[in-house]
Image (cartoon, rainbow, N blue to C red):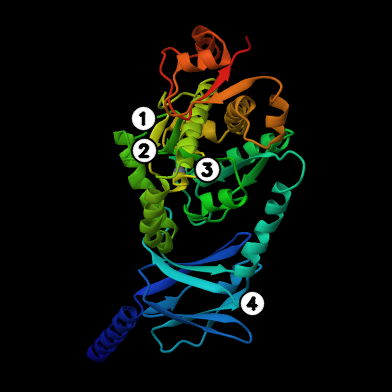
């Protein structure tokens, strides 16, 4: 009797073991990240998924089969709504050890599915990116028409809040997510810009969703931005480093140890975001190499560098600086050679004091104010052609963009002013000027 019972228990344990080994993986959660042009659906899993999928029409559905997986979460409990997804539910699986997930879609969509490895704060994931091609192009339309209006155009500043959605960015010791800090500072900056006549802000993201690093400069390009400013918060493996820094695109390799480290983490962040960018990366590198030959690159780099210096000067008034000079690196968001682009690290989220400061709305407002002040100063001095500010400035003063072969003495002769006066008007310490540099020509 006793033996029999023990035997039964053994069989039961064996059966348990067998069923466990069949379903090694488990669906633990479902998350939805709707953005204006797409929706990202994420399934959180305990292990790397083995999956296959297919689509069905009338009505449009996406069906995903997960091998060796059990379902331990109620998918219908997900309350976030998306204009692209009606419902996510389970359906009859292919066999006992698999799970079938069905996404009921509102229309036919472009789908991209890939697995992501664990990265804090998430475990293994299966990511489903759903894009409505027709909506994405029409969303850009209003921007284009306002930019083409007859009156002197606005100076357009694209603000890029780093990370978002599935990608939290760096996480502070008190669990502050970089993506939330960057969005808050960006929104405050956008408000200041939009309140200023002649300036207009365009945000690459306005909510908590993911945009790939390659897509960010694309949004700036489509809205014909005069400047792309990307907002981030730094992090390091130790709590000591602190302070803000400003980054510009590097034509060569990163010019410092910190720059090389940034490039590595940026790559990491791309992996976090999705598989597509990693493949595209080689293409964008090639594109970059070609564009480097373009003359517009020269202007764009000079502008980026000049603006970054202004931003550093202003940031210094409200926060500690990590680097007193603009830093150069080839980061994905800065690979836009035709648009002047800078990246501002507003502080170290990994430093407990700075994490506290960044969580303080008043501090974030101060950061936004200082960046705004720097941009305003720069564009007051050098407004882009055809803008309201350029028109207003026309009668106020003359400027000259240095071309190849020109020197200070040549310019002094041409404008009939003293070299000393040009130097004074532009805060020059030496007699050297660089190609593309824009000088204020003092009145005689
Ligand atoms: Zn970041």
Whether residues under marks 1 and 4 lie with C-beta atoms below 8 angstroms apart, the answer is: no
Where disc 2 sits, the SS reads: loop
**Which residue is labeled 4 in the image?**
107
How far apart are the alpha carbons under marks 2 and 1? Answer: 8 Å
Question: Earlier along the polypeptide chain: callout 1 or callout 4?
Answer: 4
**Which residue is labeled 2 in the image?**
236
Q: Is residue 32 left or right of residue 20?
A: right
Specify few, some or many for label 1: CA neighbours under 10 Å numbering under 14, 14-19, or 20 or more.
few
x, y percent for residue 385: 64, 35
Return the residue nearer the eye: 200 or 54. Answer: 200
How far apart are the alpha carbons under marks 1 and 4? Answer: 51 Å
Mark sitting on residue 228: none
**Which residue is labeled 3 in the image?**
339
Mark sitting on residue 240: 1
Q: Nearer the viewer, mark 2 or mark 3?
A: 3
Is 119 placed above or below 186 here? below
């Amino acid at each position: 009797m006793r033996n029999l019972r023990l035997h039964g228990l053994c069989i039961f344990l064996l059966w348990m073991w067998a069923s466990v080994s069949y379903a090694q993986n488990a669906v633990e959660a479902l998350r939805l990240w709707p953005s204006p042009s797409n929706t990202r659906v994420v399934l959180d899993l305990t292990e790397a998924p083995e999956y296959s999928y297919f689509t069905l029409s009338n009505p449009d559905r996406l069906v995903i089969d997960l091998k060796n997986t059990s379902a331990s979460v109620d998918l219908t409990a997900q309350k976030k709504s998306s204009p692209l997804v009606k419902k996510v539910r389970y359906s009859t699986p292919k066999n006992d050890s698999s799970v079938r997930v069905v996404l009921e879609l509102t229309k036919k969509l472009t789908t991209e599915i890939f697995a992501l490895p664990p990265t804090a704060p998430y475990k293994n994931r299966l990511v489903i990116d759903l894009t409505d091609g027709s909506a994405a192009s029409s969303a850009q339309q209003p921007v284009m028409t306002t930019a083409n209006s007859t009156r002197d155009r606005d100076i357009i500043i694209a603000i890029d809040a780093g990370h978002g959605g599935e990608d939290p960015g760096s996480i502070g010791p008190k669990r502050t997510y970089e993506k939330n800090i960057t969005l808050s500072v960006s929104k405050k900056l956008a408000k200041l810009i939009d309140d200023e006549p002649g300036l207009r802000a365009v945000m690459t993201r306005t909510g908590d969703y993911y945009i790939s690093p390659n897509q960010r400069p694309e949004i700036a390009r489509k809205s014909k931005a005069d400047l792309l400013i990307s907002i981030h918060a730094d992090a390091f493996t130790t709590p000591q480093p602190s302070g803000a820094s400003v980054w510009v695109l590097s034509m060569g390799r990163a010019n410092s140890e910190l720059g090389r480290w940034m490039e590595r983490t940026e790559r990491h962040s791309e992996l976090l975001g999705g598989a597509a960018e990693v493949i595209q990366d080689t293409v964008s590198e090639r594109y970059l190499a070609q564009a480097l030959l373009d003359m517009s690159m020269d202007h764009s780099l000079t502008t980026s560098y000049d603006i970054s210096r202004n931003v550093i000067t202003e940031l210094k008034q409200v926060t500690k600086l990590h680097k007193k000079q603009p830093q150069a690196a080839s980061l994905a968001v800065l690979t836009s050679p035709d648009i002047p682009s800078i990246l501002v690290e507003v502080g170290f989220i990994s430093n407990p004091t700075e994490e506290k400061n960044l969580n303080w709305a008043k501090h974030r407002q101060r950061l936004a104010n200082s960046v705004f002040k720097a941009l305003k100063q720069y564009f007051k001095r050098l407004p882009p052609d055809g803008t309201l500010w350029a028109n207003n400035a026309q009668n106020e003063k003359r400027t000259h963009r240095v071309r190849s072969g020109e020197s200070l003495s040549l310019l002094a002769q041409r404008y009939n002013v003293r070299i000393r006066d040009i130097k004074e008007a532009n805060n020059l310490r030496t007699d050297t000027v660089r190609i593309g540099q824009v000088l204020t020509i003092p009145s005689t």
